[in-house]
Image: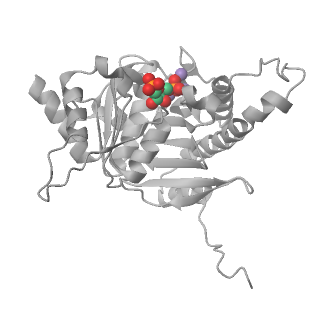
Amino acid sequence: SEREDLRTDFVTLTNDILNRQQRHKEATGDLTILLSAISSACKWISNVVRKAELMKVIGVTGGTNVQNENVQKLDILSNEIMCNLLRNSGKTAILVSEEDDEAIFVEDPQKGHYCVCFDPLDGSSNIDCGVSIGTIFGIYRVKDAGAKPTIADVLRPGTEMVAAGYCMYGSSTVLVLTFQGSNEVNGYTLDPSIGEFVLTHRNMKLGKKKIYSINEGNAHTFDEAIKGYIDSVKFPPPGHTGKFTPYSARYVGSMVADVHRTILYGGVFLYPGAKLRILYECFPMALLVEAAGGKASTGRKRMLDVIPDKLHARSGIVLGTSEEVDAVETRYKAMD
Ligand code: AHG
Ligand code: MN
Ligand code: MN
Ligand code: MN
């Protein structure tokens, strides 16, 4: 038939996480159920993100709009979707969201053993112009399933996360996921017509392109290490062939998109100073980038070794190809 070259042997996210569970004899299936809730939430958020602009024109009557605005802000709506689906999964004990000052402690009968830290919609400055945004999540298991969960169950180093990932709402919707100790990052693209995340990026490893990504408008705040490093990628010494090869600059302004590109194409993403939040921005991305063969650092130490002192603690971050992250760290060492 004319469809002979149409592949039908694809793998879905659902399948991958179920298979993973079966390989682990001691697994209870709780993490599988939790990830399935996250996957559903991301599909739902993807749907509202893609409809949002049209809804301003054609949508809602009771809740106002048809130019009268007052449709719920997308990051708040995304937060409600995440919170509700995570709670209803029955597998969560604590929810930490960028949009909520306090942690949410899930009560019985929905209470489970996992803590999820998430940024429901990352890249808020890009929402209204249709540029890629995303959802970021990091998952811990409570320290003691028999004890009452406390904040200490999430104020832990990133190395203790059991899984982390993001979903990017870009030209396509792609969910990227890794598990602690797996050294494997897989990406699944949403086929909206069937509502499945299909494995499209198996075992992602950082690309080799020379790209630097930083909001250079903040240059007046950069310390000598960052200034020096940025200068070095824009004005590298000519190679032995005498060719001048400065890096390309790429900066979306959505961490999800900037990290996704960094994983696929390579290079380095930097946000110095302390803007990005450790638990639901820095840690998940650090776990992914390390599993994809790169490094993530505060500039002075491995990002995943940081112990956050509060829920919304922030840090500077440098992530990407090992050589680039090493180069930045070397400059910080030289400063001390
Ligand atoms: P959020 O939209 O979740 O508040 O996060 C915004 C973050 C992150 O997405 C991005 O990397 C960074 O802010 C961009 O900051 P600048 O606009 O300062 O470059
Ligand atoms: Mn964010
Ligand atoms: Mn956000
Ligand atoms: Mn925000």
**In terms of depth relative to the viewer, which is nearer, 107 or 258?**
258
Position of residue 185 relative to residue 331, above or below, is below
Quadrant in which residue 89 is drawn:
top right
Quadrant hosting residue 18: bottom right
Quadrant of residue 4 within the rendered picture: bottom right
Residue in the image at 37% along x and 56% along y: 205
For the view shown, which residue lies furthest in the bottom direction?
Answer: 1
Q: Position of residue 98 (x, y in %)?
A: 53, 22
Q: Residue at x 56, y 42 (%)?
A: 168
Q: Is residue 72 above or below residue 233?
A: above
Q: Quadrant of the N terminus?
A: bottom right
In the depicted view, which residue is nearer to us: 110 or 77? 77
- In front of the other: 80 or 27: 80
Residue 143 in view: no
Residue under the point 28% across and 32% down: 305
Q: Position of residue 203 (x, y in %)?
A: 42, 59
- Residue 118 falls left or right of residue 308: right
